[in-house]
Amino acid sequence: MRLNQELIKKFSENISNNTKLSNYSWFNLGGPAEYFFKPKNKEQLIEFLEENRQNKLKLTILGAGSNLLIRDKGIRGVVIKLGLPFSEIKLIDQDIIEAGAAALDRKVANFAKDNGIGNLEFLSCIPGSLGGAIIMNSGCYGNDISKVLVSIKVIDLKSCKEKEIKRDEIEFYYRGSNLSNELIITSVRLKGKKQLREIIEKRQNDLIHKKKLTQPSQVKTCGSTFKNFGNNQKAWQLIKQSGCDSFKEGDAEVSKKHCNFFVNNGKANASDIEKLINKVRETVSKKTGIDLELEIKIVGD
């Protein structure tokens, strides 16, 4: 099914077709979006969603693309990308921040630091945007988003209405939540703890330094490929002990610095990454009996 011409004309300034998606993935891979919609504000997003109820085209919400592998043939339907209008960060109370879903995690961490709000330093080490962090319950170094969340605002795709969901209405678990795929997160409220800026900055810098020592940077990667298994089984340890830490597929390879990170060396395609994922997963399963679960998302055809 295709968008009707009236709808395309109505949103012509914000919608395009056959848009290259590799520019929106940290792997720098992926085919085109059949339609690519970047709403200018929340009102236009709701208007588009209401119009699409008749078209019934599949919708894919794209965040920062930091944990996303887009297949080579691209994505059918409409890819919705929340941009700058959904990235504002502001102070609600002395220890509460409200940020748009498209705000980058590291920018939220820096805003918190500059306003003397602690306990959000871990966000400086998480790639991607805040909306994705909520869906995945992103975290590192003993903290995660569920521990600092107050509430979220979402648009329900069924009703095309915005509503607020409180923290205690959401069930979070390791790298996931029970939030429906029928919701688009538009903004998030986080609660930290008032502290001296100097203390926050030192803690944040220590975390960033720790990350740089153990994880690759300045390469085309989407971070941790697999979730850790249980409390004591790190995915990278299982990959290493299974002899997968030097695996390659085309121009894709397991990172030499952290073997749960897979890297596009520049000439790989998405199928190379996916083949590498499957090869590592199958080998670990054969050697250890453990089936690794993906942390990154794979979308498209």
Image (cartoon, rainbow, N blue to C red):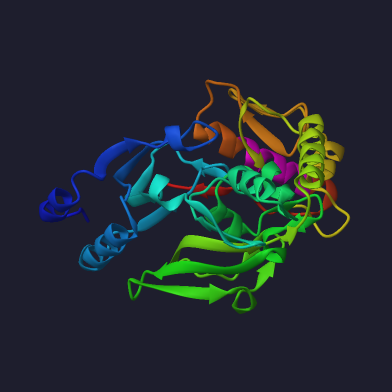
Can residue 282 be found in the magenta stretch? yes
Q: Is residue 28 above or below residue 296?
A: above
Q: How many marks?
A: 0
Based on the displayed image, in which of its 4 quarters is residue 186 positioned? Answer: bottom left
| 121 with respect to 36 (left or right) | right
Q: Nearer the viewer, residue 205 or 2?
A: 205
Range covered by the magenta-colored residues: 276-285
Can residue 270 be found in the magenta stretch? no
Quadrant in which the N terminus is drawn: bottom left
Based on the displayed image, in which of its 4 quarters is residue 3 positioned? Answer: bottom left
Q: Position of residue 119 (x, y in %)?
A: 75, 56
Kindly identify the residue that appears in the image at 63 percent across and 26 percent down. 219
Q: Position of residue 296 (x, y in %)?
A: 60, 48
Kindly identify the residue that appears in the image at 40 percent across and 37 percent down. 21
For residue 284, say whether it is visible. yes
Q: Nearer the viewer, residue 278 or 217?
A: 217
Q: Position of residue 135 (x, y in %)?
A: 57, 60
Based on the displayed image, in which of its 4 quarters is residue 4 positioned? Answer: bottom left
For residue 226, say whether it is visible. no
Quadrant in which the C terminus is drawn: top left
Q: Is residue 264 above or below residue 159?
A: above
| 30 with respect to 2 (left or right) | right
Outermost residue on the left side: it is 6
Kindly identify the residue that appears in the image at 33 percent across and 54 percent down. 41
Q: Position of residue 53 (x, y in %)?
A: 25, 68
Q: Is residue 134 above or below residue 13?
A: below
Identify the main secondary structure in magenta.
helix
Q: Nearer the viewer, residue 155 or 246?
A: 155
